[in-house]
């Protein structure tokens, strides 16, 4: 059953939820140094936290991460079962409950892996202590372990206290009470030593990314980890095999339901797009969008970047769902998720300072104050492009301590030393060439068109900036500005969406098509005629979407209505 | 006994591993040590000035006091002077200099460099420093706090960190280095100004109906009865060019004086003019003058490069809390072609140090920012060339005896602000500054991703009860500031 459950856990993370694992990984920078260990492990719960971070670094590769999560969750089950004084089919089935609850807990991207280690260590310590046959040494060891476990696992050390008490059958209640009081004392003492409020020292300094929230599912899992040991106390008849199987089946079914209920496919989709942007999988983004159009501004902005990077934006942008300018260049939001993909867009556009700001701010916004390998990489890149090589080296040196970033950091440092960095890293050379050199401005959300225009003016080769400028005007339905900018388009064939926008402008300002410029294809003119006729006939939006959903006209009249 | 033997053997092994200079080539140049402590002036009460020798795979250093006492340290990365022996050596060297002989091993060959001196001043330095540590960022902040550093050792302790509450800890300002009296501002959902008077801590709401906003930049009156504050509507802008990253500017600002005894903010029309931006108020050493900086309002962001702050002063009567009627210009920004920031009078009343940058009121993001000195007796000004660098040299504060000053500088890597301390002699000449000492300083500062902000000397440990502070901050209750116009 344990193996079966392990396989189910693996499949869940590897097949259904892999991008949550990538997401977790990008919000930490696990450094294999003594200083890092000290800084993490010196807080209550620090050892478990460090072990959790160690595991999380492997989420860089989702299948490996899924395997590790599966092993950890199975570990919780096994140690829960081992903590029972009577190992029956019933307690075996019940021992799966904490793992299942933890599976649901980890559907939340803010759940931290250290919490699982804390539970395993606490339960494991209880099991080990029970192996000591002599009463007095066992009790003394248990009491001595309370402060040790509080420091190693944090407040989940309470599981150790409860399971230990239950394993003793509550016979030695004075020892049990001493352990409980000692744990309370540890919390109160920690308050004097560590700069954290009492609530956090009581409910875990680092089990969850947001400090001011108590992770309910985790504590429920902790409580249920005590349950089998409690059931062992009750003198039940040995249940029949079918009863155990039924209970197991019930737990499995409830777990599956709970996990799929706790899972958030919308977030998983966005994390998937974000991952593909990070890895620059432009074609895969479009293939994914072809299967299911993204609807969230964050995911749409990833799709638009892919269209821009492959030169398909002017022709195909409106073949996909568009939700306004926010889906092209989302505004800055002070959190650790929103600026990530947007910062990637600015990086590819050549707005190096803005990319730096977004990466820096996203990292500073990480609620549990961790650093990020991904953002350190970007900050090293932006500082390199800006000529701030000392600062870039600082980030790179930190990245050298991280298993999955070491190679890249070492290679970058050697390229810097050999002076070949811009030759061997074309992405950096492009950012250096695209960035503004003559003009300066203070970034303004209201003047994105001017900023994009300047990028194109200073670097005629920056076609992405032009695509974004035109798309910005189109998505804002600012046809006047679009017409002003159309002179910058130098393509021999006017792209589809530009033709559609110009035709729309034409019909808004002319009575007929006489004198229509030659670069506007007659086929599009005929189609807009049909579109106007259908609009006048009062066709439903759904019908219009079926016939014209791939046109700018449909967007203009039926999408982003806030602009009107 | 067995344990003792093990410990002894381990110690012997460590000693045996320490690289020792032998067969050294004598070279005629000074060693390029990091940090650059060659020829610096230090106080007797400073922690060991450990350093590295870049390029060398080992170094062996000998310090010699004027009486011939020697202290030696060697290592592969950096020196590690014994703290107590270092302290004794400095005491023996007061008024003279330590002779420092550095040897480095380069590709297996030892080289002995020309010795240099470290001058040990007779002037004492305060107990420690307080400062804020924060990543040099934009609008959002991660882990940060106010810390206290004992100068005679490497001991640093947090006074208040934002792990204790949701918010940002702003700069700590004490009364002329007196640790019991300080003000500290918290921003965010738990916004408050903490005020400690003789160690008694309270949380205040400093915004009144008659003033612009919350109190921002503080400076204590020498008597401890008043605190001068600015109140600023501050915004940030982000440049596109590579040499400029961030611009911080005010859209409005005034200055005001808080009467601690009456719990009232005092202001006057002459320091609250609508067409002027007044900021950075400081009291003179005798407490009878209020210095501040002021600039004519300009259009933001277009005219930001024309925003230049002059140094102004107005009289102040500590008996009645009356602000004088006549505001006088002390230094005209136009004559400098720059903008004056962070005026700080020395506590002996002789000088006023300020930061000059091309424009604006936030020089930390200006690479050209330098420290300047105004002689309050002669009115002469000069750049402090002894300490300035090619990168940002900015916020500064005096020691309680006005013989030392601490300032923040980005000379290291251009971004992360570090603290430098310089001696200041009775003739108004500064010594070569030295970087705040750390064990293995190169590695320490390389690994430190936070900047030092608003350093300030303190004469003793700050008696801040962090649990009480945390309770006050997390509680919604705030003592409101009263208000009165100056007579």
Image (spheres, rainbow, N blue to C red):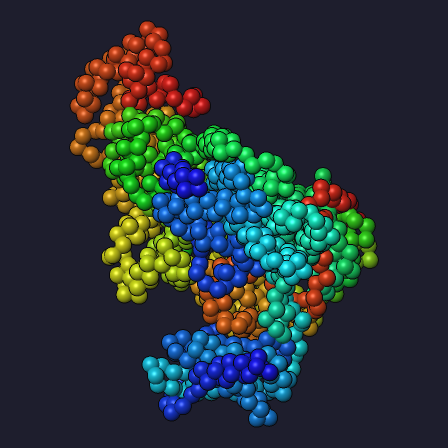
**Circle count:** 0
Of residues B338 and B157, the one nearer the viewer is: B157
In the picture, the quarter occupied by the N terminus of chain A is: top left
Above or below: residue B448 compared with residue B39: above
Residue A491 at x, y percent in the picture: 20, 34
For residue B400, what is the image quadrant?
A: bottom right
Rendered view: A394 above or below B1: above
- Image location (x, y in percent) of residue A441: 41, 45
Residue B173 rendering spot, x and y as whole percentages: 67, 59
Q: Measuring 29% from the left and 17% from the top, which residue is drawn there?
A: A548
Using the rendered image of the protein, determine whether residue A251 is visible from the camera's viewpoint: no
Q: Who is closer to the viewer here, B83 or A261?
A: A261
Q: Depth check: A81 or B479 in front?
A: A81
Give percent across and percent down for residue B416.
Answer: 48, 60
Instruction: Give me the residue at 50% from left, 71% from top.
Output: B441
Indicate whether B363 appears above or below B60. Answer: above
Q: Is residue A43 left or right of residue A3?
A: right
Question: Does residue B111 appear anywhere in the picture?
Answer: yes
Residue projecting furthest to the bottom: B68
Q: Quadrant of the C terminus of chain A?
A: top left
Report the residue at 48% width, 64% height from top.
A34
Q: Residue at x 61, y 39 (%)?
A: A231
Which residue is at the front of the view, A445 or B35? Answer: B35
Q: Is residue A420 left or right of residue A300?
A: left
Question: Does residue B208 sit above or below B295 in this rendering?
Answer: above
In the rendered image, the residue lying farthest to the top is A537
Q: Is residue A119 left or right of residue A484?
A: right
């Amino acid at each position: 059953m344990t193996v079966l459950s392990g396989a189910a856990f693996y499949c869940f993370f590897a097949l259904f939820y892999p991008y949550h694992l990538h997401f977790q990984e990008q919000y930490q920078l696990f450094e294999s140094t003594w200083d890092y260990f000290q800084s993490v492990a010196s807080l209550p719960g620090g050892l478990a936290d460090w072990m959790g971070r160690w595991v999380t670094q492997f989420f860089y590769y989702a299948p490996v991460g899924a395997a590790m999560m599966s092993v950890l969750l199975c570990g919780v089950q096994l140690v829960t079962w081992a903590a029972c004084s009577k190992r029956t089919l019933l307690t075996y089935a019940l021992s799966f409950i904490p793992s299942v609850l933890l599976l649901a807990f980890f559907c939340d991207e803010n759940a931290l892996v250290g919490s699982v280690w804390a539970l395993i260590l606490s339960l494991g310590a209880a099991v080990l202590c029970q192996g000591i046959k002599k009463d007095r040494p066992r009790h003394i060891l248990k009491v001595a372990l309370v402060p040790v476990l509080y420091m190693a696992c944090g407040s989940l050390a309470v599981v150790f206290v409860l399971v230990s008490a239950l394993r003793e059958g509550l016979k030695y209640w004075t020892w049990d009470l001493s352990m409980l009081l000692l744990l309370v004392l540890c919390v109160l003492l920690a308050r004097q030593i560590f700069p954290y409020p009492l609530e956090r020292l009581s409910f875990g300094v680092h089990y969850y990314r947001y400090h001011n929230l108590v992770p309910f599912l985790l504590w429920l899992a902790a409580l249920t980890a005590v349950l089998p040991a409690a059931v062992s106390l009750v003198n039940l008849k040995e249940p029949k095999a079918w009863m155990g199987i039924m209970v197991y089946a019930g737990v499995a079914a409830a777990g599956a339901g709970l996990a799929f209920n706790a899972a958030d496919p919308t977030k998983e989709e966005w994390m998937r797009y974000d991952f593909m942007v990070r890895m620059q999988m432009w074609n895969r983004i479009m293939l994914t969008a072809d299967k299911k159009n993204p609807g969230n501004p964050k995911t749409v902005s990833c799709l638009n970047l892919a269209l821009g990077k492959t030169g398909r934006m002017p022709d195909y942008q409106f073949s996909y769902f568009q939700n306004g300018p926010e889906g092209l260049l989302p505004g800055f939001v002070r959190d650790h998720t929103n600026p990530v993909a947007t910062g990637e867009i600015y990086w590819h556009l050549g707005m190096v300072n803005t990319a730096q700001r977004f990466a820096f701010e996203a990292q500073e916004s990480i609620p549990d104050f961790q650093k990020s390998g991904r953002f350190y990489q970007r900050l090293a890149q932006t500082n390199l492009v800006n000529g701030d090589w000392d600062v870039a080296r600082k980030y790179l040196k930190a990245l050298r301590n991280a298993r999955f970033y070491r190679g890249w950091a070492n290679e970058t440092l050697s390229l810097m030393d050999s002076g070949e960095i811009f030759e061997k890293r074309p992405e950096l050379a492009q950012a250096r060439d695209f960035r503004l050199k003559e003009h300066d401005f203070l970034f303004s959300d209201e003047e994105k068109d001017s900023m994009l225009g300047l990028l194109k003016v200073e670097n005629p080769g920056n076609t992405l900036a032009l695509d974004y400028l035109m798309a910005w005007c189109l998505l804002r339905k600012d046809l006047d500005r679009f017409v002003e900018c159309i002179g910058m388009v130098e393509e021999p064939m006017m792209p589809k969406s530009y033709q559609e926008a110009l035709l729309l402008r034409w019909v808004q300002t002319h009575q007929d098509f006489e004198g229509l410029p030659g670069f506007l294809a007659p086929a599009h003119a005929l189609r807009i005629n049909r579109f106007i006729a259908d609009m006048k006939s009062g066709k439903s939006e759904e019908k219009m979407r079926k016939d014209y959903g791939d046109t700018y006209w449909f967007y203009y009249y039926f999408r982003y209505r806030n602009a009107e | 006994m067995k344990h003792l033997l093990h410990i002894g053997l381990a110690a012997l092994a460590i000693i045996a591993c320490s690289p020792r200079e032998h067969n050294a080539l004598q070279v005629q140049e000074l060693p390029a040590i990091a940090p650059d402590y060659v020829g610096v002036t230090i106080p007797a009460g400073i922690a060991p000035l450990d350093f590295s020798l870049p390029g060398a795979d080992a170094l062996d250093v000998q310090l010699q006091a004027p009486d011939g006492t020697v202290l030696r340290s060697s290592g592969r990365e950096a020196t590690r002077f014994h703290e107590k022996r270092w302290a004794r050596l400095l005491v023996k060297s007061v008024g003279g200099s330590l002779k420092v002989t550095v040897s480095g091993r380069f590709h297996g060959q030892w080289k002995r460099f020309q010795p240099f001196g470290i001058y040990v001043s007779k002037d004492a330095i305060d107990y420690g420093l307080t400062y804020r540590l924060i990543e040099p960022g934009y609008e959002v902040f991660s882990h940060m706090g106010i810390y206290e550093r004992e100068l005679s050792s490497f001991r640093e302790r947090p006074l208040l960190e934002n792990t204790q509450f949701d918010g940002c800890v702003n700069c700590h300002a004490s009364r002329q280095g007196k640790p019991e009296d300080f003000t500290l501002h918290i921003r965010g959902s738990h916004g408050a100004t903490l005020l400690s008077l003789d160690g008694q801590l309270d949380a205040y709401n400093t915004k009144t109906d008659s003033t612009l906003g919350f109190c921002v930049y503080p400076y204590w009156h020498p008597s401890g009865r008043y605190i001068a504050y600015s109140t600023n509507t501050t915004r940030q802008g982000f440049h596109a060019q590579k040499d400029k990253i961030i611009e911080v500017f005010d859209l409005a600002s005034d200055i005001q004086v808080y009467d601690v005894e009456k719990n009232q903010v005092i202001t006057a029309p002459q320091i609250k003019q609508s067409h002027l931006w007044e900021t950075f108020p400081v009291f003179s050493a005798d407490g009878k003058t209020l210095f501040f900086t002021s600039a004519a309002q300009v259009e933001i962001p277009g005219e930001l490069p024309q925003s230049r702050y002059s140094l102004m002063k107005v009289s102040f009567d500590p008996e009645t809390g009356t602000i004088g009627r006549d505001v006088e210009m002390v230094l005209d920004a136009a004559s400098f072609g720059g903008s004056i920031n962070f005026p700080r009078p020395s506590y002996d009343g002789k000088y006023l140090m300020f930061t000059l940058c091309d424009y604006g009121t936030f020089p930390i993001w200006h690479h050209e920012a330098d420290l300047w000195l105004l002689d309050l007796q002669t009115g002469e000004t000069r750049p402090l060339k002894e300490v300035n660098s090619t990168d940002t040299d900015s916020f500064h504060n005096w020691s309680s005896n006005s013989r030392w000053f601490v300032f923040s500088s980005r000379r290291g890597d251009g971004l992360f602000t570090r603290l430098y301390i310089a001696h200041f002699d009775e003739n108004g000449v500064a010594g070569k500054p030295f970087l705040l000492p750390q064990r293995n300083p190169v590695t320490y500062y390389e690994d430190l991703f936070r900047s030092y902000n608003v350093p300030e000397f303190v004469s003793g440990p700050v008696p801040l009860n962090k649990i009480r502070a945390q309770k006050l901050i997390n509680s919604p209750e705030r003592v409101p500031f009263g208000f009165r116009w100056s007579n």
